[in-house]
Image: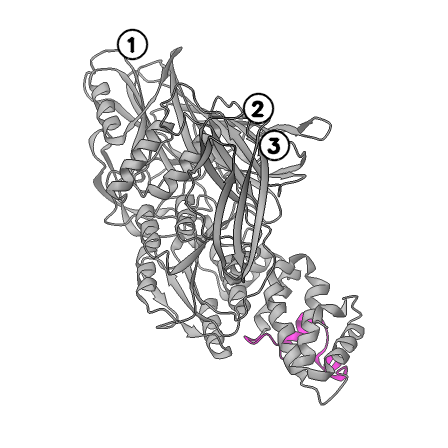
Amino acid sequence: MVYPGGLLTPQEKSVPLKSISVTLSICEFVAGVSATLNYKNEEEVPLEAFFIFPMDEDSAVYSFEAMVDGKNVKAELQDKMTAHTNYENAIIRGHQAFLLEEDMCSRDVFCCNVGNLLPGSQAELTLKYVQELPLEADGALRYVLPAVLNPRYQLSGCSEDSCLNMKTPVVSLEDLPYTISMVATISSQHGIDRIQSNCSLSPIEYFGDNKTSAQVSLADGHKFDRDVEFLIYYRAVHTPSVVVEMGEATTKSDGVLGDPAAMVTFYPNIPEAQASIPCGEFIFLMDCSGSMQSPISKQRRSQLRIDVAKETLILLLKSLPLGCYFNIYEFGSTYEAFFPNSVKYAQSTVEEALQRVKLMRANLGGTEILTPLQHIYKQPSVPGHPLQVFVFTDGEVTDTFTVVREVKSHCLRHRCFSFGIGEGVSTSLVKGIARVSRGTSEFITGKERMQAKALRALKRSLQPVVDDVSLSWDLPDGLSAKMLSPEQTVLFRGQRLILYAQLTGTMPPAEATGEVCLKYTLQGESLENKVTFSLQPKLDANLTIHRLAAKSFLQTKDMGLRETPAGDKKDVLKVSMECGVISSHTAFIAVNKDFSKPIQGPLAPRDVPRPMLLHAAPVMQSMSLQRCGTGRRARMCLGYRQEKKCLSEACLEKPKSRASAKKTNAETHGPVVEDNRLAQLISLQKADGSWDLNEGLALVLGMKLEDIQAALPDKDVNSSSWATVLAVLWLHDNAKDMDCEWELLERKAVAWIHIHAGSVRHELVKAAIAFVKSSVDPAIFGP
């Protein structure tokens, strides 16, 4: 079954892509990946095949080659326009040609062209890339092989040359004509504690006395219904290190590859501190496009993206400090702000905002994030309150580079903390806007709780500014370090910092060592972290550190084919071509000149289909045909209407009665559980940090209101003080494992108790602990 929203390709025509095999090698926190696409033309005419696929935007693609009927053809990295011309000319001359490129509008989408695949021919296309693995709050390293490419919302002004304009066929999982296999090898000198995955795996094999390596593979029959995700827990991860990699002797001496490169990893030991005067202007930008109506994952009872985002937004609102300013924007094809300008954080403004948050729906059409961002940046600043923008989105947009450039142009006046919700989210958008604004990005998939990650970002936005960040080197005479990473101006507590440098000059004897020192100032106190390391460079045939260094440089300069300034474009082309790492200005091309037979008429186009996921929210498309793309990529395809609708079976059912809908919801989500009580308790907290003593609080505490009132030790004491102490005790007794989510709420509550309970505070705490039979240490309420 071919979903009619895709390219109208005759069903009886076979698709030439037969299988995808992936070899993954993870050493410490760096992943090396080799992915092979196996094609075979089983038709009677020559074919040109197109395959569009997602890839994490941090991936440094450095190799592309083709094996055609037993002959290996190595691809060359060229200027993108030159590569396109050479590809066209090769096809015209009857050669076989292969092209690999980043999309023009987003660096996390790639297109692979297989040109002039003869009847009966087989081709194996292998691409290789390396990437840094992000570190999660619980110490896990996360690797994701993107398998889900959600439809990207199409702006009317988007480039027609984008490969996202190619409307590939969409088929059911059962009808998907190709398979995927994956073998992963994982190693760490610190030992591996455990490996988790969202997919079915073969039994994990561990090697070494300390489990220093492991091998695992995807179970047979894996479908492309989810991204392949690994969470890897080492026995030690927060260890600063410096690794020096040998350069390539045959490369020009003035280039990056010719000299040794160093990869420096710090875990800055920033002490926990609070700003003397909590302040800030907090803008929450909430995606309410149709795709947010989809579940976060395919897992059973997975919450809708919009529902999780709303719950998280409520928690963030309750966690903001007194004295700050805030506003909320909901956006889709249009946008609307809750308030004309940011408002002072107070009970009245928070209550008004909460009422509107509860009414939010994923019904605003497409994902046009650029316009509301521009509106936010045009608003006057609140003096003394730095701007912090929190973006919640499923990231399904096509104008990624334009959005990132807009955020970058205002980076001096704000920080952006972004959250990608669900699988198939654009890593290029979510990571890009955070990186250029000196913020952080988070991704929420599967059963992960967004609340914990959002609160981690909020804590970072509230921490005192770390000033005077600098890096100094102590190296032997005749050797110097040239930074390849951008200047680091922001440090967060608990953050891992990775920097790259080129070592130039004369390398000393093998036993020589060097030292690198990270210095910074926090609230007037000078701090530093040092690492001593061996200067003996290690040999790596893949030049992994050099490629990662090049990628780090490209991410700061490359703003897309049309958006990059002329001066930066020159640097991007130089580093990309020299280091062999693909960019938006370059493309890999391989030509098999051994075969040359004039083509009789146009090649038959075959677009590799992607799976249709019932939980996804594909873009509704009109039936009018339009021309998409130029040159050989031109297609007759279905044009977008600028709206999104859910096409899951549930959405196609007849409307249910209110009672029926309530029953269905209860069957889907089950009975009220502990975290629902936590959410209810959070919703009852007032902006100043206190709770009122009422029926709602009694319900959460699981007690009768009259019993709580009767237990009040001093009838002259404000009942809110009694209620607030009981609420804090409940958090410690019943939600301790989620304390990262309510830590800021508790901080406000305890501060309020100190002010309003006065001299009876200790008596209240002692009576409350006895009343609820708690084992909580009274010290949590302070001295």
Whether residue 693 is visible to the viewer of this picture, yes or no, is no
Is there CB contact under 8 Å for labels 2 and 1? no
Q: Residue at x 33, y 61 (%)?
A: 372
Q: Residue at x 52, y 60 (%)?
A: 458
- Which mark is nearer the camera, 3 or 2? 2
CA–CA distance between discs 3 and 2? 43 Å
- The quarter of the picture where residue 315 lies is bottom right
Q: Magenta stretch containing residue 527, yes or no?
A: no
Which quarter of the image is occupied by the C terminus? bottom right
User: Which span of residues is magenta-colored?
Assistant: 686-712
**Secondary structure beneath label 2:** loop
The amino acid on which the numbered mark 3 sits, given as a three-letter code, is Leu
Callout 2: few (<14), some (14-19), or many (20+) C-alpha neighbours within 10 Å?
Answer: few
Q: Write down the residue under mark 2.
A: 510
Residue 401: % across, % down: 32, 46
CA–CA distance between discs 2 and 1? 47 Å
CA–CA distance between discs 3 and 1? 42 Å
Q: Write down the residue under mark 3.
A: 201
- The quarter of the picture where residue 135 lies is top right
**Secondary structure beneath label 3:** loop
Q: Write down the residue under mark 1.
A: 594
Residue 195: % across, % down: 63, 36
The amino acid on which the numbered mark 2 sits, given as a three-letter code, is Ala
Task: Name which of mark 3 and mark 1 comes first in the sequence.
Answer: 3
Callout 1: few (<14), some (14-19), or many (20+) C-alpha neighbours within 10 Å?
Answer: few
Against 113, residue 400 (above or below) is below
Task: Name which of mark 2 and mark 1 comes first in the sequence.
Answer: 2
Visual colour scheme: one colour
Which quarter of the image is occupied by the N terminus? top left
Is there CB contact under 8 Å for labels 3 and 2? no
Task: Name which of mark 3 and mark 2 comes first in the sequence.
Answer: 3
The amino acid on which the numbered mark 1 sits, given as a three-letter code, is Asp
